[in-house]
Image (cartoon, helix red, strand yellow):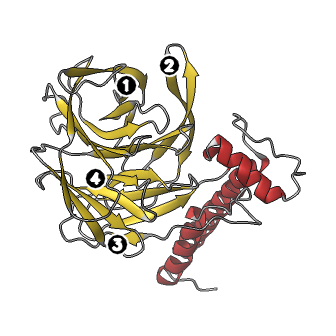
Amino acid sequence: MHVSVRSAVPLLTAVALLATVPAARADAPASKPSPDPRQFTIRDARITESSGLAASRAHPHVYWTHNDSDDGPYVYAVDSRTGKTVATVTLRGINPRDVEGISIGPKGDIYVGDIGDNFDGRWNEVWIYRFREPAKLRDTTVDPVRYTVRYADGGRDAESLMVHPRTGRVYIASKNDRRGGLYEQPDTLNASGVNTFRRIADTELSATDGAFSPDGSRLVLRGYFSARMYRWEKGGSGHRPRFLSTVRVPMQWQGESVTYTPDGRFLMFGAEGRNSAVKPVELSGRELPGSLREKVEREQDGDGERGDARGGDDDGDSPAANSNTVVGLVTFVVAVSAWLGLRRLFRRRD
């Protein structure tokens, strides 16, 4: 049989694509699937460097974002159903330098992190701004509380600001593949002095954003092409992250932001650029926050009799997760075998 290189290219492409398609999640909700949030595009021409993302607590379908730098003291509320900005908040008296992160605390306050440092630690101080999430979506000007921040071990470049949804404590993740770390606020944030954040864990990730799950049991840090999920556990003098798993990140030109949907079932990944897309990734199994995982398993079971339903948090892989791994390995082997077979055929023709 004559097979030309040109005719083999589509076959190789199809096989390669097959190898990259994620296996069907056997542990995804079957009886009552959660509503899949739509991918949406940020339509506001002013938002060209969306660098942080936070799901609104007060307004369904709304996500707060901001530009990276050179924009001014503005925070935008974007409706995910239309991609249009429905409110612009101006921070009075603020001249931002490099705004990189945004998060919402347990009392409905929005925290904005002016924490970027493209010189990897040149700035001795960075800032966090706090204001109450508006009850009504309209253009408004607010007087934010401003916190001056220093790191106990010297200046750091950072793009990830996370506020725990239950304790209200603020955390910053520095951006460095080898020396990246998670920093925690002092016991109390002081608007009139300097707040020294201390390192509590290593991340070894060039983190561009992070987010806590709505119940505070999970922490996600994302980079440009990867993301890591941690279990938030109590230990020693406070809570610490414990690595749980890697998380699939959608393909994006410059992946910058991440936040949970309010129900905790999806991660929303954002990127920089004009008309940038925000893409959902569904979570399942142990990726889900503990209380939500139990709820999803009950939905799957119906009568609660599934043998592998354990609920809560555990370290072991579920049978469904193991099945996904096996399917993925088989797909990879098939793809490699097909490639080797075609390569052998071409050599025979030569």
Give the residue at x 76% y 42%.
311
Disc nearest the viewer among 2 and 4: 2
**Badges 3 and 1: C-beta atoms under 8 Å apart?**
no
The x and y percentages for residue 241 are 51, 29
Which residue is the site of mark 1? 184
Q: Residues within 10 Å of mark 4 (few under 14, many from 20)?
A: many
- Mark sitting earlier along the chain (3/1): 3
- Mark sitting earlier along the chain (4/1): 4
Task: Label 2, secondary structure: give it.
Answer: strand
Disc nearest the viewer among 4 and 3: 3
Gap between marks 3 and 2 measured at Cα: 39 Å
What's the mark number on residue 83?
Answer: 3
What's the mark number on residue 238?
Answer: 2
Gap between marks 4 and 3 measured at Cα: 16 Å
Could you tell me the amino acid type at mark 2? Gly
Q: Residues within 10 Å of mark 1 (few under 14, many from 20)?
A: many
Which residue is the site of mark 4? 51
Gap between marks 4 and 1 measured at Cα: 21 Å
Gap between marks 3 and 1 measured at Cα: 34 Å
Task: Label 4, secondary structure: give it.
Answer: loop
Gap between marks 1 and 2 measured at Cα: 10 Å
Could you tell me the amino acid type at mark 1? Glu
Give the farthest residue toward the top: 236
Snapshot quadrant of residue 64: bottom left
Left or right of residue 289, residue 177 in this image: left
